[in-house]
Image (cartoon, rainbow, N blue to C red):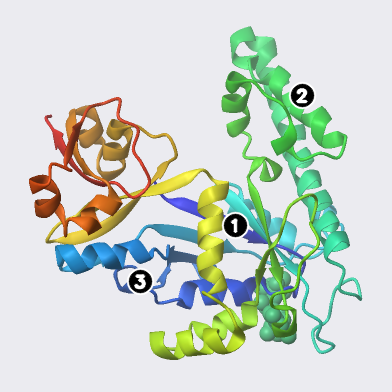
Amino acid sequence: MSLSIGIVGLPNVGKSTLFTALTKNAVLAENYPFATIEPNVGIVAVPDARLIKLAELAHPRKIVPATVEFVDIAGLVKGAATGEGLGNQFLANIRETDAIVEVVRYFEDGNIVHVDGKVDPVSDAETIKIELILADLGTMEKVVARLEKEAKKDKARGAGLETARKLQAHLEAGHRALSCKLTDEECAQAADFHLMTAKPLLYVANIDESQIGTELALIDGQAPIPICAKIESELADLDADDASEYLAELGLPEPGLDVLARAAYRLLGLQSYFTAGEPEVRAWTIPLGAKAPQAAGVIHSDFERGFIKAEVVGYDDYLRYGGEKGAREAGRLRLEGKDYVVQDGDVMHFKFNV
Ligand SMILES: Nc1nc2c(ncn2[C@@H]2O[C@H](COP(=O)(O)OP(=O)(O)OP(=O)(O)O)[C@@H](O)[C@H]2O)c(=O)[nH]1
Ligand SMILES: [Mg+2]
């Protein structure tokens, strides 16, 4: 499962600064060096300290973290949906991402122009919300026209038309598609429309050093994740020791990027399980509630198709008994079948037959 996140926001709020910090961040990333697909697409390792602990016991040749793809686009401005600025043409680049991170400017800096003349997070977020809704309305206009045509020829093919109209009305009322109540079937149809406002959204408050530790007001009912993009990009240039010293100086327990990665996982209802052996210790991304065969399928579809059983050691047991061998001897290695609901941090081996 390749998880992808689009970065949006007004111009000059620090999107590219955050993107650069994310993609420079070398934590565990040697197996995924900043993989540039296009200049604005970066593959980022998901920081997970558990990988290091597992590696201390399994002595693998390499460590492979889970990854997230970030896509940076140009800033959106008021009127983007009707052709103002550059941003709107780049929205297409993030149409197929799984989630959106919206960078909102909190930092004050007279040298950095704010497009609307003053720093106002709530109003800025409202501007972006409106532009994204307008972009979605543009999409829906085309979708509805197409489905109407198809429905005329063949009723069954117009099945999504009602859903499309429902979403259109919801967007016209000024709401995000995400808040539209849909049945499972309607949801499946709506997925084809690739609406921006149907994606889960995280706000990142790009703050000043002086704002570290201050409480931030909610944006549209959500707590923003405070990140000092400028500091993060400086941190990314330091080696591990210097970075932790710098963090301590600033009074930060961990880099903001780690907080962001975790928040994104939570937002999307994801978790990790691990495989640990001599070739590699590796994190795999699965949805919360995934069963063993689905987890196996993330490694290879054959593993899912021919799933027989899984050998599972809980993360804590793996550490407590010094690895797989110890856990097995202590009777803490379980055999689980196809209905097993995988737990975050499980260390797993799959038996399969194809
Ligand atoms: N003082 C201060 N400046 C910042 C901070 N983050 C970014 N900047 C500066 O703000 C300017 C714009 O940052 P970018 O990251 O390019 O902004 P952007 O959102 O990508 O802008 P567009 O791509 O034009 O939409 C740059 O000069 C950054 O150095 C911050 O936390 N504090
Ligand atoms: Mg930029």
Secondary structure of residue under mark 1: strand
Vertical placement of residue 212 versus 314, above or below: below
Quadrant assignment, res 185 = top right
Secondary structure of residue under mark 3: helix
Instruction: Give the residue at x 24% y 41%.
Output: 300
Q: Give the distance between the C-alpha atoms of the residues marked 1 and 3, in whole angstroms.
A: 20 Å
Name the side, left or right, on which 94 lies relative to 123.
left
Residue at label 3? 29
Looking at the image, which residue sits at the far top?
A: 155
Q: Is residue 274 visible?
A: no
Residue at label 1? 6
Residue 354 appears at what percent x and percent y? 12, 29
Whether disc 1's CB lies below 8 Å from ligand 2 is answered no
Q: Give the distance between the C-alpha atoms of the residues marked 3 and 2, in whole angstroms.
A: 44 Å
Whether disc 2's CB lies below 8 Å from ligand 1 is answered no
Instruction: Give the residue at x 81% y 58%.
Output: 125
Instruction: Give the residue at x 71% y 60%.
Output: 224
